[in-house]
Image (cartoon, helix red, strand yellow):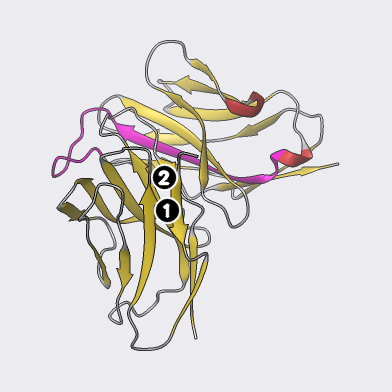
Amino acid sequence: AQSVAQPEDQVNVAEGNPLTVKCTYSVSGNPYLFWYVQYPNRGLQFLLKYITGDNLVKGSYGFEAEFNKSQTSFHLKKPSALVSDSALYFCAVRDRYMFSGGYNKLIFGAGTRLAVHP
Amino acid sequence: DGGITQSPKYLFRKEGQNVTLSCEQNLNHDAMYWYRQDPGQGLRLIYYSQIVNDFQKGDIAEGYSVSREKKESFPLTVTSAQKNPTAFYLCASSTRQGADIQYFGAGTRLSVL
């Protein structure tokens, strides 16, 4: 079965320090991986995705994520955190070839709240 | 402006009442989705539609119904059979390509009076 784990409910980091939000996944085949961000009372905004190729993916707002196949991880990173980065972050996975009823389902993690302190 | 519009932003339901949440997109996407978000549980799929006049149950469809009569519109009805409807509801759309992004609306917060 497909699944996504975000092991930390909350991550606290000081402004200017590097940040990491962790994500591990489980799929039977090869994954498509996504990171989304959600600000209070808003929908999710796409940050970045991994399809194939270079394991380091760069996305919006200076975020990047590293795909590690052996560790089945896709951690989100940023070299220098901003207070405005404080939000809820979701990792999501889709199995490249797993179709159920003709639909290739996207599975979301439970989310990690990032708090960046001045 | 291209995007997904959900309305209303806030909605209150009385006991025994059906309520309908609106979702409209002008992205020309074939696929549309409804998710429910509860604190600490991430997003759970209620219904999805890959094409007009077709839709499928997701993981938590009980107590909900949908229609897809137009490509642009995918309304969700929360029926009286849904005993715990208080949640944040998100609509999304995408193309039908496996690697494609789902684009989300701003959400509707439903509460019970």
Residue at image coords 26%, 64%: B61
Q: Give the SS element for disc 2.
A: strand
Number of the label disc, if any, that sits on residue B68:
none
Which residue is at the front of the view, B49 or B60?
B49
Image quadrant in which the N terminus of chain A is located = top left
- Labelled pair 1, 2 in contact (Cβ < 8 Å): yes
Instruction: Give the residue at mark 1.
Output: B43
User: How many residues crowd mark 1 within 10 Å: few (<14), some (14–19), many (20+)?
Assistant: many
Tag 1 subunit = B
Image quadrant in which the C terminus of chain A is located = top right
Instruction: Give the residue at mark 2.
Output: A108
Within the image, what quadrant is residue B14 found in? Answer: bottom left
Tag 2 subunit = A
Residue at image coords 27%, 80%: B81
Task: Give, as a single range, the part of the protein colored magenta.
Answer: A85-104
Which residue is at the front of the view, A13 or B22?
B22
Kind of residue at badge 1:
Leu
Kind of residue at badge 2:
Phe
Give the x, y percent position of residue A48.
Answer: 50, 28
Task: Judge whether residue A66 is colored magenta.
Answer: no
Relative horizontal placement of residue A79, taking residue B46 as reference (left or right): right
Within the image, what quadrant is residue B83 found in? Answer: bottom left
Give the x, y percent position of residue B67.
Answer: 22, 60
User: How many residues crowd mark 2 within 10 Å: few (<14), some (14–19), many (20+)?
Assistant: many
**Up-down relation of residue B78 to residue A69 (above or below):** below
Residue at image coords 59%, 50%: A9
Give the x, y percent position of residue A81.
Answer: 75, 32
**Up-down relation of residue B39 to residue A39 (above or below):** below
**Up-down relation of residue A66 to residue B41 (above or below):** above
* Residue that sits furthest to the front in the current view: B1
